[in-house]
Amino acid sequence: MIKIGQSIHPEWISGDLNRLDEELKQIKEAGADCCELVLHGLDVVIGGRVILPRMEALLSVLKKHGLEYTLHMPHGLNLLEADMLEINLGIFRSGIEFAQAANIKLINFHAGKTKSDDKALIHKEMEQIKLLAANSPDILFCLENPLFFRDDEFSAALNAGDMIEFCEQVGLGNFKLTFDIGHNFLRHNGNADALLGDMDRLLPYAGHIHLHDNCGIKMEIKGPSTGHRLVCGIGDIHLPLGWGRIPLDSVFARLKAYDGIINLEIEQRFSDHYSECLSLVREKLGSSPTVYKP
């Protein structure tokens, strides 16, 4: 059954539980079934360990809103960053500890990046993820395609084929892929056919979907504000659905074969449009609101 969510905004919340409460209320009132929490906006894991009094206060806020939650690991977590490996593994384990306390059944995380072309490193990342997932069989772990890779970077998520191979090598029932549609569209410089081709290949392996719009312009722009990037239509600008150039009708046609959570990642400055975006997804996919029973 398809469920539809909307992410919190970690930089806006910045550890403020009152702001978190406010945003969760807004997401619920917009008609969402689910909400994706982002770990580095919650201040519940500090120094790689869970702060228990903080977690109790956080859980109290989460329980108020009748939402099902998923968890996004920190955007900067990179299991291929050798100097930070033990710290990042500690963060990952603590994120799992928090997820279990909050009855969260899905954890999303970005594939690692490295400047080494040694495939043994990616195999090591796979083994670490496999161990984490095997030790937490009650949670679905989903590897996401990150946004950009530089020419000298290597990853398990460089392309659809690499992601599928990685998923098959992990080979666990509680490990799947997150397909971020906006990231993929930018990765292909706004090539709709390439996006749809990757969807066809990856959806059978997908346990989670991220959906937001953009203009498909991948060029980097240094210095200017988010507002300037929006005016230019450049980069990962997380627009409301229909404001960019992603071929939504073709995307929705393919998503009819998907069964799981579709999480919207609409930028917080466009929060007045959460409801219309959630309603659009429901209309296109025939989804009805669900009542979450923890």
Image (cartoon, rainbow, N blue to C red):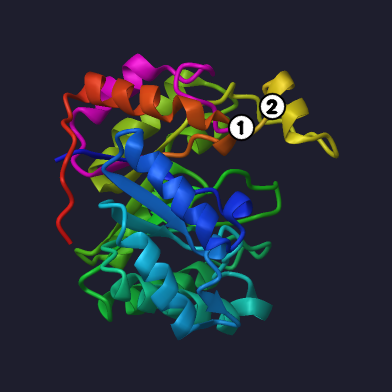
Predominant SS of the magenta segment: loop
Measure the alpha-carbon separation of dots 2 and 1.
7 Å
- 248 left or right of 184 in image: left
Asked whether 42 falls inside the magenta stretch, the response is no
Quadrant placement of the N terminus: top left
Looking at the picture, how far across and down is residue 145, in whole percent?
Answer: 48, 48
User: In which quadrant of the rendered view does residue 267 lie?
Assistant: top right
**Which residue carries the number 2 mark?**
234
How crowded pointer 2 is (Cα within 10 Å; few <14, some 14-19, many 20+) is rated as some
SS at badge 2: loop
- Identify which residue, 104 or 130, lies in the foreground: 104
Q: Is residue 127 visible?
A: no
| Residue type highlighted by circle 2 | Ile
Q: Secondary structure at mark 1?
A: loop
Give, as a single range, the part of the protein colored magenta: 236-263
Identify the residue position indicated by label 1 in the image.
237
Q: Residue at x 28, y 81 (%)?
A: 135
| Picture disc at residue 222 | none
Residue depicted at 25% across the width and 52% down the height: 66
Label 1: how many residues lie within 10 Å, few (<14), some (14-19) or many (20+)?
Answer: many
